[in-house]
Amino acid sequence: WAVAQHGIYHQNLTVVPIYDTFGEEAVKYIIEHAELSVVVVSKANLSALAHTVEGMDVVKMIVLFDFPEGKDAPPFTRLLSVPEIMSHGEKVMHDASAPEVRPEG
């Protein structure tokens, strides 16, 4: 989780925490309201998340900490593991995206 958070901050993006205790309707609302195209999830919560986002057009990718054994990606999204993303990041380095400074007022 910390690696994903660091990568998100490095690109000047926003982390939107979603907890499994929120319930399905709250998770749907947060994903839609924040327009989350990428969701990072643990193996334990993948099934519930896959059920929740099924049919939602906004989620384009799910990043999974560990691949579940014997399961494929949900058909409606792209499933990547953290090691795959880290490997890709080592090959395609990008400078950090610093926040834009806006004048006060």
Image: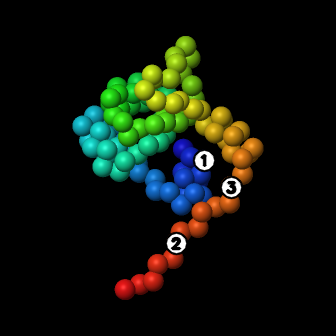
Colouring chosen for the image of the structure = rainbow
According to the picture, the residue beneath numbered tag 3 turns out to be 94
In the displayed orientation, state which residue is furthest to the front.
57
Instruction: Find residue 89 and report its horizontal and vertical position in percent.
Output: 69, 45
The residue carrying pointer 2 sits among few (fewer than 14), some (14 to 19) or many (20 or more) residues within 10 Å by Cα, namely: few
Amino acid at the residue labelled 3 = His
The residue shown at (35%, 28%) is 54
Mark 1 or 3: the one toward you: 3
**Viewer-nearest of labels 2 and 1?**
2
Q: Earlier in the sequence, mark 1 or mark 3?
A: 1
Q: Which residue is pictured at 50% across the width and 23% down the height?
A: 73
Secondary-structure class at tag 2: loop
- Where's residue 35, x and y in %? 37, 48
Is any part of residue 22 visible from this angle? no
Q: Earlier in the sequence, mark 2 or mark 1?
A: 1
Q: What amino acid is found at the position of numbered circle 2 in the picture?
A: Glu
Which numbered dot is residue 88? none
Instruction: Please name the residue that numbered disc 2 is placed on.
Output: 100
The structure residue drawn at horizontal position 29% and vertical position 39%, both measured from the top left corner, is: 28
Q: Residues within 10 Å of mark 3 (few under 14, many from 20)?
A: few
Quick one: quadrant of the C terminus?
A: bottom left
The residue at the point 31 percent across, 40 percent down is: 27
Query: Residue 61 or 14: which is nearer the viewer?
Result: 61
- Which residue is outermost to the left? 25
